[in-house]
Image (tube, rainbow, N blue to C red):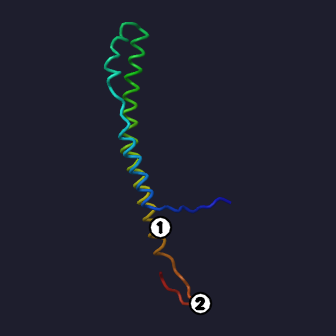
Amino acid sequence: MAEKEVFMDTNIFTGIVDDIRGAASACILKTEPLLKADFLDDTDVGRELHSLLQEAYKMTDLHRTEASEALPCALSKLRDSMITVDDTLSKSIVVESAGGNKRKV
């Protein structure tokens, strides 16, 4: 039977999220090749290739933005919600002592 438990060191998790943010923001394609691709517009096939190249650059930039901003933000929210759930659950635990008296932990 699969375990339904999650164990997380929040400091390590936060470090991983920060590493993702930093690595993703550093992945930038140089625009020099794209700026030199105007010669492709001389033929039908070249125009299509140039268009695809421009689209690839746009998608790469979008991917970098999502990976360096949206993904780390979502992972941080996930971490925070897991901490909140854990805190709420731990405060709701009731322990019975050997004498049968209940006390809230």
- In primary-sequence order, the first of circles 1 and 2 is 1
Quadrant housing residue 79: bottom left
Residue 91 percent location from the top left of the image: 45, 75
23 or 52, which lies in front? 23
Q: Residue at x 54, y 90 (%)?
A: 101
Q: Is residue 24 above or below residue 80?
A: above
Q: Is residue 62 above or below residue 55?
A: below
> Tag 2's secondary structure?
loop
Quadrant housing residue 55: top left
Residue 10 percent location from the top left of the image: 44, 61
Which residue is most to the right?
A: 1
Residue at which label 2 appears: 98
Tell me the crowding category of disc 2: few under 14, some 14 to 19, or many 20 or more residues within 10 angstroms, Cα based: few
Residue 30 as seen in the image, left or right of residue 91 = left
Q: Which amino acid does label 1 sit on?
A: Asp
Residue at which label 1 appears: 86
Q: In this view, does 2 lie above or below 43?
A: below
Q: Residue at x 65, y 59 (%)?
A: 2
Residue 51 percent location from the top left of the image: 39, 18
Tell me the crowding category of disc 1: few under 14, some 14 to 19, or many 20 or more residues within 10 angstroms, Cα based: few
> How many marks can you see?
2
Q: Which residue is drawn at 39% across and 41% down?
A: 24
